[in-house]
Amino acid sequence: MPKKECVRLLIPGDLEPDCLNQEWRVVSHPQKAKVLMFWDTFEWGIWFGGHILYSCGDDYHLCSSEDGWLGTQLFEEQASGMRRFWRDFESLPMRSRLEELLGLRALLPVAEGAFHWHRSDVSNETGKIVCRLEWTSVTSGERGDEEVLHSCLVMPLRGYEAEAARVVEYLTARGAHATEESALALLLQHGNNVPQKYTLRPSFGLKPETPAREAVRRIVRSILEIAVRNLPGIIKDLDTEFLHDYRICLRKIRSLLTLVKDVFPAAETGRMRTVLGDIARQTNRLRDLDVYLLARDEYRALLPLELRPQLEGMFEDFSAERALEVKRTISQMRAHPASQRLRKIEGYFSEETRHKASSAADLPVGPLVFQGIYKRYKKIRKIAQGVGVETPDESIHQIRIECKKLRYLMEFFDELIPGEDGAALLKMLRKLQGRLGDFNDASVQQKSLLHYWQQKKSSSESALGVGGLVAILYHRQQQTRGQIEQELAAFCGGVAAATFKRVFKLPAHTYRALYDEIITLTKP
């Protein structure tokens, strides 16, 4: 029975299978009823990944999604308690698939409904079954009495498609109508919890001629909105990604205000950057601890089996410190609500707020930003010339910071960059940043581990485990140094250099026009 021949209808609540008895013979099978709890993440990774995860009692079921309806069941697992992360599941197939869909995100309940199903066979006058009907009713609410959906799936048997079509017509004449909305979609709508795509790189609707101040306003307010959306997850300590994304948003805004200069009054811009920095620093230690604990399995895998147990004490200390740090961070956030402080910043960048004139405020953002991108790229090339075997870690770290600033600029304004060129350059830049990030992580982790050891001065067995890990991280760092040199050479020369020059280096008359416009705007 081809799926495309099935028809799903929304039906009035009082329409029952017995109404078909006037023209067909209907045999109904016993009704089944279950209360289902549906799960997904803050990012709706399961929904947009084409799956549905629900629990019924102690059983979790992962199904394919057939246009939002429960499709083929892929995996099932009986659980004695709630599962929060993919690693909490026991069966390997379930864990593997959920790891792909969830990543580091926690499962959250997104909808609950009572489902009632019953099937009916519809036979013609000769006793042949022409189609089967699957009737579904969904209710919600604390008492399960709020009607969400009544539907009927008409499934024709091979050779009786025309007769099944008559059944559809019959039901349609009595108030039924075709629908593309699913039971889960309607249940989510009923609870005002509609799935939305989540991204740290929203579109800002910019054009090259957009005034620079207007462009910065749009970007800042969009990213602030993302930061505010992550605050409840931090306060509830749902998963580590809320804090991670929140800090990225704050860092991006601070970078933008530094990189695109003279768009707002300098003193006010500096004050905004200071406030954002103070807010971010509240969470520095908590993020450090998250990073260490997320690397737990990786650290253990680096050591021989005999040494792995000797790291457990360190991770227990980190876990205990994190529990205290979460309480401190939440208490501080509640005492000085970050959401209110961010909303004040958002107000500063609103269209209603009037500001003093700035030299670049009314300049077209396209040429202004392209000039900044090319300038930032040339700075990276200049620093890269001195990179070698003996280059201090601090210099590598400086290149990483400059590359991050360049990436932010290109991502903020990627709507203005020619698609293929921008994608190719960003791909190279992210690859280089990955190497630089690995190098920096190894450097920071070595210092942190040594600091931990100096603070604890615990057993010699623990020292062996920590010392072994430091040695491995040092070796990894040195390997990464050679990879960085290769990536820098590719990024700073050849095709990349030619593309940066072609796309971002503006002709001299463009710079002259910008200069003349700045002079005109700043005249008394």
Image (cartoon, helix red, strand yellow):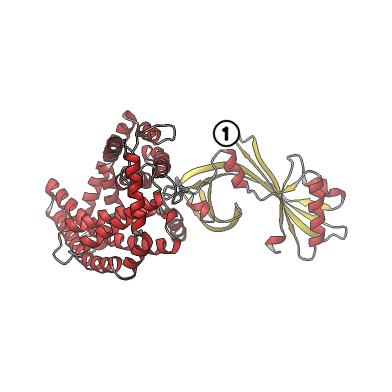
Residue extending furthest toward the top: 335
Residue 238 % position (x, y): 39, 42
The answer to whether residue 465 of the structure is visible from this angle is no
Q: Residue at x 31, y 58 (%)?
A: 374
The reply, left or right, for residue 423 in relation to residue 297 is: right
Residue 246 % position (x, y): 36, 43
Q: Quadrant of the N terminus?
A: bottom right
The reply, left or right, for residue 18 in relation to residue 369 is: right
Residue 503 % position (x, y): 38, 62
Residue 230 % position (x, y): 40, 41
Q: Nearer the viewer, residue 491 or 330?
A: 491
Q: Residue at x 59, y 46 (%)?
A: 185
Crowding around mark 1 (Cα neighbors within 10 Å: few <14, some 14 to 19, many 20+) is few
Q: Residue at x 73, y 44 (%)?
A: 11
The residue that mark 1 highlights is: 142
Q: Is residue 442 above or below residue 189?
A: below
